[in-house]
């Protein structure tokens, strides 16, 4: 970190954080991006659905983005942010201000904060799932469906969205099996839909995945039966990485779908603004459904919004200074 005070500190160096940093650096703002080095998509072989970057390894995309931010004078550093606090020096001014403390004890101030810390995928407690996650254990058909096209797919149910997931992945393969695992039996309507699409339903808890030669070859049920599969789909519970925000008064809220909690996000408006003035969010921390391209777009939106916010503050400061300069001495 080259200085002690910045216009904006961005916490998180993924697609959202780097895009926010790039937009702000191009707006000639002093910006620091602090990246904790825990990208959600690290296990994936490539990023998909990102026009002109389809199939690019996540680490390569991050490296290119980092270089672009630095090319406009922005700073990008590796490190862990331990604490976010309101800046005592800003109290009573009517303007936001923050202190950012990193794990190595460094402290910098920021006029605005952009938090793009992403989320954590809570995976089913099934042996082999965590080890194969992002490779041949998947969750998003638009991220990975094409890569497992025409393969034997297994959907390990964990809630009421499993039928929807099975019907989605049926678009990419004619051989889809829905393992009910801990989910309830499908409704009569759902059973009709699954049968019409040729999706087989297997009852019983899943005990583990079968792996051979560094690839999934099947799903083992608690009964001992093994159903041959080439790839497995799960529905993780997605939890916002939001511990840092608690000290500022921002906490995650449960996201409920079909009367079931599927994850948590921190509320923000469409521009990324939160209930705390000066604090903005971008990417999965506030939108669990955002793919990489969406997160990048959100970063651009937030960067532009933050710059406009700072322009307004800078203008108010300039007007006050001009008025003071015109006032007669002693008046």
Image (spheres, rainbow, N blue to C red):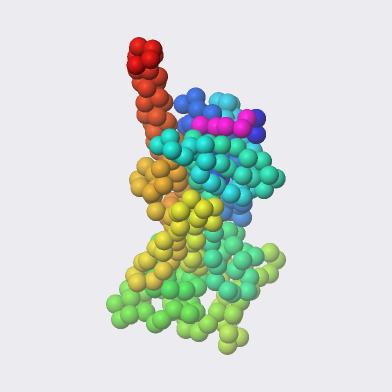
Write the residue at 55% across / 32% down.
Answer: 6
Taking the image as shown, residue 212 lies to the left or right of residue 111, namely: right
17 vs 173, nearest the viewer: 17
Which residue ends up furthest to the bottom in the rendered image? 223
Res 57 seen here: no
x, y percent for residue 304: 41, 33
Taking the image as shown, residue 117 lies to the left or right of residue 78, namely: left
User: Magenta: predominant secondary structure element?
Assistant: strand
Task: Give the quarter of the figure containing the C terminus.
Answer: top left
Res 73 seen here: yes
What segment is highlighted magenta in the picture? 3-7
Which residue ends up furthest to the left in the rendered image? 189
Residue 121 higher or lower than 60, as above or below: below
Which residue ends up furthest to the front in the rendered image? 330
165 vs 4, nearest the viewer: 4
x, y percent for residue 145: 48, 58
x, y percent for residue 184: 41, 81
Residue 157 higher or lower than 224, as above or below: above
| Magenta-drawn stretch contains 152 | no
Write the residue at 46% across / 53% down.
Answer: 249
Write the residue at 52% across / 53% down.
Answer: 247
Report the label total: 0
Which picture quadrant has residue 216?
bottom right
153 vs 330, nearest the viewer: 330
277 vs 302, nearest the viewer: 277
x, y percent for residue 321: 40, 19
Taking the image as shown, residue 96 lies to the left or right of residue 102, namely: left
Residue 224 higher or lower than 284, as above or below: below
Residue 299 higher or lower than 264, as above or below: above
Task: Give the quarter of the figure containing the N terminus.
Answer: top right
Write the residue at 55% across / 67% down.
Answer: 123
């Amino acid at each position: 970190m080259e200085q002690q005070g910045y216009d904006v500190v961005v916490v998180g160096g993924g697609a959202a954080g780097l895009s926010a940093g790039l937009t702000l650096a191009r707006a000639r703002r002093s910006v620091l991006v602090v990246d904790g080095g825990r990208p959600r998509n690290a296990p994936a072989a490539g990023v998909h659905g990102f026009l002109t970057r389809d199939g690019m390894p996540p680490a390569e995309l991050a490296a290119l983005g980092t270089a672009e931010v630095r090319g406009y004078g922005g700073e990008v550093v590796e490190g862990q942010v331990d604490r976010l606090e309101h800046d005592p020096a800003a109290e009573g001014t009517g303007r936001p201000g923050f202190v950012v403390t990193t794990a190595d004890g460094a402290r910098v101030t920021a006029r605005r904060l952009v938090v793009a810390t992403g989320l954590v995928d809570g995976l089913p407690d099934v042996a082999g799932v965590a080890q194969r996650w992002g490779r041949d254990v998947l969750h998003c058909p638009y991220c990975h469906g094409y890569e497992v096209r025409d393969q034997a797919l297994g959907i390990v149910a964990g809630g009421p969205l499993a039928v929807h997931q099975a019907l989605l992945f049926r678009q990419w393969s004619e051989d889809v099996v829905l393992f009910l695992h801990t989910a309830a039996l499908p409704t009569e309507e759902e059973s009709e839909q699954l049968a019409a699409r040729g999706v087989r339903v297997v009852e019983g808890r899943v005990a583990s995945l079968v792996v051979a030669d560094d690839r999934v070859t099947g799903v083992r049920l608690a009964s001992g039966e093994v159903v041959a599969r080439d790839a497995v789909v799960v529905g993780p519970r997605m939890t916002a990485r939001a511990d840092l925000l608690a000290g500022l008064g921002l906490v995650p809220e449960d996201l409920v779908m079909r009367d079931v909690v599927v994850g948590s996000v921190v509320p923000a408006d469409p521009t990324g603004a939160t209930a705390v003035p000066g604090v903005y969010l971008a990417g999965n921390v506030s939108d669990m459904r955002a793919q990489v391209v969406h997160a990048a777009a959100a970063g651009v939106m937030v960067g532009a919004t933050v710059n406009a916010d700072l322009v307004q503050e800078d203008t108010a400061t300039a007007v006050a200074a001009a008025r003071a300069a015109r006032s007669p001495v002693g008046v």
